[in-house]
Image: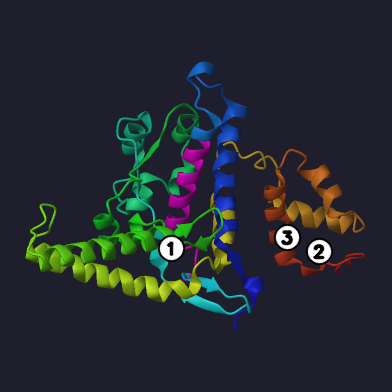
């Protein structure tokens, strides 16, 4: 059994990624005014949709980044007894989105992509995107992403990972409802075809023998997949905490960083103030040093300081070193 303290639920990681993207958009608003008129702004639901899809691509992209050690590039089902069972990484790729090719975002994205970028996730949205500014206004003014969310049962059976929504991102759990329904429909269709053939009826909607054989093979693969996953249906998925740390480290771009005015790094500012005033509480330190920082920003600075000085998180006076 693995310690749960070293793991983060996928649902929490998803919230973290959305928060990062939303905060960068808010920071852009605080620095500049939107060119679009108010009546050209997207609804809150449409803006939320942009952020939600971008967050999924961001999480996908950090999988292959050097920020995460190779040994931590795994995801797990968390059982009720606390045991961790390794899950296929393909679950994090279980959605089928692209950007709206008629959008301003599409043209801006193409212009800003590095020639060395060859990952499909970064091609749409990812790690390096956060450092750019062009997308932040566009998330407020246009539908950036498009989704083909209506698939035939044949498409679902042929590519269940991408087309059956196996991962519910909001809950961070495995969901098999769509795959179950597709397999059930296929079984019923197969039964109907067999019944008609026994009575000498050739159905006009039937498949050729070759296509039918291929379809049955894919159906068997999907059925075995469903049998394997059924044990973990609605189980939460977790990832090593290093994934969240990687998100924390990457999201603040150099430009517009309000903490660049400090002589030392934020963690050093915290340690220095705590050294001079050891009885100050965490909230008081935030108010003195970073009154405009979000709670999540300050928590990141605090965690970095605590890693250098573990006594920071302990109650009582921090001893001065000679």
Q: CB atoms at circles 3 and 2 under 8 Å apart?
A: yes
Q: Nearer the viewer, residue 254 or 220?
A: 220
Q: Along the polypeptide, which appears first: circle 1 or circle 2? A: 1
Disc ID at residue 2? none
Q: Along the polypeptide, which appears first: circle 3 or circle 2? A: 3
Residue denoted by label 3: 305
Q: Quadrant of residue 221?
A: bottom left
**Which residue is found at the position 51% from the left and 17% from the top?**
39
Of circles 1 and 2, the one toward us is 1
Q: Residue 121 in magenta?
A: no
Residue denoted by label 1: 176
Q: Secondary structure at mark 1?
A: loop
| Dominant secondary structure (helix, strand or loop) of the stretch shown in magenta | helix
Q: Which residues are magenta?
A: 47-72
Q: The C terminus is located in which quarter?
A: bottom right
Q: Secondary structure at mark 2?
A: helix
C-alpha separation, residue under disc 1 versus residue under disc 3: 43 Å
Q: Nearer the viewer, residue 64 or 146?
A: 146
Which residue ends up furthest to the front in the rendered image? 199
C-alpha separation, residue under disc 3 versus residue under disc 2: 8 Å
Residue 87 in sight from this viewpoint: no
Disc ID at residue 312? 2
Where is residue 160 shown, x and y percent of the image?
33, 61
Residue 107 as seen in the image, left or right of residue 14: left
């Amino acid at each position: 059994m693995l310690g749960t303290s070293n793991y983060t639920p996928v649902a929490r990681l998803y919230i973290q990624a959305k928060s990062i993207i939303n905060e960068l958009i808010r920071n852009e608003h605080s620095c500049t005014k939107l060119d679009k008129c108010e009546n050209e702004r997207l609804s809150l639901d449409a803006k939320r949709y942009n952020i939600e899809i971008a967050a999924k691509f961001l999480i996908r992209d950090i999988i292959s980044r050097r920020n995460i050690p190779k040994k931590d590039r795994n995801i797990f089902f968390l059982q009720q007894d606390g045991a961790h069972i390794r899950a296929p990484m393909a679950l994090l790729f279980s959605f089928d989105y692209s950007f709206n090719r008629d959008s301003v975002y599409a043209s801006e994205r193409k212009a800003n992509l590095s020639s060395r970028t060859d990952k499909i996730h970064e091609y749409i949205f990812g790690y390096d995107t956060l450092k750019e500014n062009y997308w932040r206004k566009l998330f407020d003014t246009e539908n950036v992403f498009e989704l083909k969310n209506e698939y035939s049962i044949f498409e679902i059976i042929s590519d269940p990972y991408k087309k059956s929504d196996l991962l519910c991102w909001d809950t961070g759990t495995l969901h098999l409802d769509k795959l179950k329904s597709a397999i059930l429909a296929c079984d019923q269709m197969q039964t109907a075809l067999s019944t008609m053939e026994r009575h000498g009826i050739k159905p006009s909607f039937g498949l050729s023998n070759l296509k039918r054989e291929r379809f049955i093979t894919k159906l068997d693969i999907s059925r075995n997949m469903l049998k394997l996953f059924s044990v973990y249906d609605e189980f939460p998925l977790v990832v090593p905490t290093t994934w969240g740390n990687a998100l924390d480290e990457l999201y603040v771009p150099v430009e517009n960083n309000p903490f660049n005015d400090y002589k030392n790094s934020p963690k050093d500012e915290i340690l220095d103030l705590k050294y001079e005033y050891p009885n100050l509480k965490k909230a008081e330190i935030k108010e003195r040093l970073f009154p405009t920082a979000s709670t999540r920003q300050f928590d990141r600075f605090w965690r970095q300081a605590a890693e250098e000085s573990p006594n920071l998180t302990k109650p009582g006076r921090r001893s001065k070193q000679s």
